[in-house]
């Protein structure tokens, strides 16, 4: 079985030290550690290939990706500028897409919305990333500071992507309860959730059951204990709301594709999981 594959979370090592750009640094060692932690096989330094632009393009080509989505970030601790994300996409627009990022707490709502508009307009990015749980202080998705961005995105049809997962500063910021309020307030807002709120799998599944606008991207956590429920749900009602992501450089792309094929997703779901759901959410042409 072969399917076109869109990797919803794929970033090169050269983008930032956080992704293993510089050998011998604590960040480099952290990328190696996380690779081991999430079940990467082979050398835990595999990501060094993407320390160059040519290496990154070769990596996504060898993995057989139809498209890799490079995700920006704007938090007090890490800023991946939208211009840099757009520059990377420009290396191979046929195989790369980008998601921009803003922080309305740091920037203020008017500046954040203006930057979001620029990101999806002149820069050609496909959505906006927000990371309330990684702010200073950490916040929940329904914090009033983020509501103007949601309102703008809903009106413009721009998908918003939220960061979740077990690396939030405290477990309470990985609670999807705040997302429920956002989905109720903005019923047309298209929402993608990176890391799938793992390990709170049942909670996010409950929200996605009620709100078809919520799209779950467990990425590297799809292969961790407790994640079989994502697969069970996708074989039923979640088939149009579960999306593939590798979390590269924290997990090999090719291995993640192969591992996903062994999880038990029904054949009629695989094409949607690997490609169609992402293409629809990002406004890309069907394969």
Image: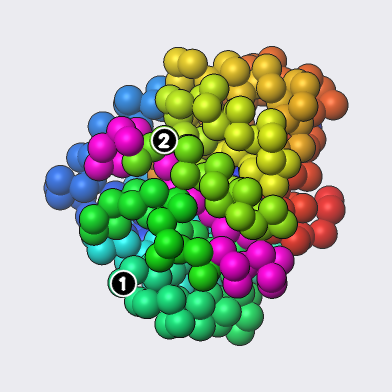
SS at circle 1: helix
Task: Please give the name of the residue rendered at 56% of the width and 64% of the height, measured from the top-left corner.
Answer: 150
Badge 2 local density, few (<14 within 10 Å), some, or many (20+)?
many
Say which quarter of the image contains residue 122.
bottom right
Q: Give the number of the disc on residue 175.
A: 2
Task: Please give the name of the residue rendered at 58% of the width and 16% of the height, measured from the top-left corner.
Answer: 228
Q: Is residue 60 above or below residue 123?
A: above
Expressed as whole percent of the image width and height from the top left, the position of residue 87 reads: 50, 75
In the rendered picture of this protein, how many numbered marks are placed on residues?
A: 2
Q: Which residue is mark 1?
A: 106
Instruction: Tell me where the magenta segment starts and ends, as one range.
Output: 150-172
Say which quarter of the image contains residue 123.
bottom right
Report the front residue among 65 and 196. 196
Expressed as whole percent of the image width and height from the top left, the position of residue 244 reads: 62, 38
Expressed as whole percent of the image width and height from the top left, the position of residue 256 reads: 55, 31
Task: Please give the name of the residue rendered at 50% of the width and 64% of the height, measured from the top-left corner.
Answer: 147
Expressed as whole percent of the image width and height from the top left, the position of residue 253 reads: 53, 38
Q: Is residue 153 above or below residue 193?
A: below
Q: Quadrant of the N terminus?
A: top right
Dot placed on the residue nearer the N-terminal end, 2 or 1: 1
Tell me if residue 275 is in the magenta stretch: no
């Amino acid at each position: 079985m072969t399917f076109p594959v869109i990797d919803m979370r794929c970033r090169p090592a050269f983008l930032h030290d956080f992704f293993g750009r510089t050998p011998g640094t604590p960040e480099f060692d952290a990328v190696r550690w996380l690779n081991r932690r999430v079940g990467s096989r082979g050398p835990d330094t595999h990501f060094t290939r993407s320390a160059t632009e040519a290496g990154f393009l070769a990596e996504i080509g060898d993995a057989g990706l139809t498209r890799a989505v490079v995700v920006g970030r704007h938090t007090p601790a890490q800023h991946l500028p939208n211009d840099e994300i757009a520059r990377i996409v420009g290396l191979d627009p046929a195989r790369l897409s980008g998601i921009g990022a803003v922080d309305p707490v740091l920037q203020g709502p008017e500046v954040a919305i203006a930057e979001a508009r620029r990101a999806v307009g002149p820069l050609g990015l496909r959505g906006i990333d927000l990371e309330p749980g990684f702010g200073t202080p950490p916040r929940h998705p329904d914090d009033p500071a983020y509501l103007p961005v949601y309102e703008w995105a809903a009106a413009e049809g721009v998908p918003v992507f939220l960061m979740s997962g077990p690396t939030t500063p405290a477990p309470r910021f990985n609670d999807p309860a705040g997302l429920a309020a956002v989905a109720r307030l903005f019923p047309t807002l298209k929402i993608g959730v990176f890391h799938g709120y793992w390990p709170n799998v049942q909670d996010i599944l409950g929200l996605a059951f009620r709100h078809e606008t919520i799209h779950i991207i467990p990425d590297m956590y799809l292969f961790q204990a407790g994640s079989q429920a994502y697969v069970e749900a996708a074989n039923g009602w979640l088939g149009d709301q579960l999306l593939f992501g590798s979390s590269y450089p924290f997990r090999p792309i090719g291995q993640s594709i192969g591992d996903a094929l062994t999880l038990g997703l029904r054949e009629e779901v695989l094409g949607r999981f690997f490609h169609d759901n992402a293409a629809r959410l990002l406004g890309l042409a069907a394969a």
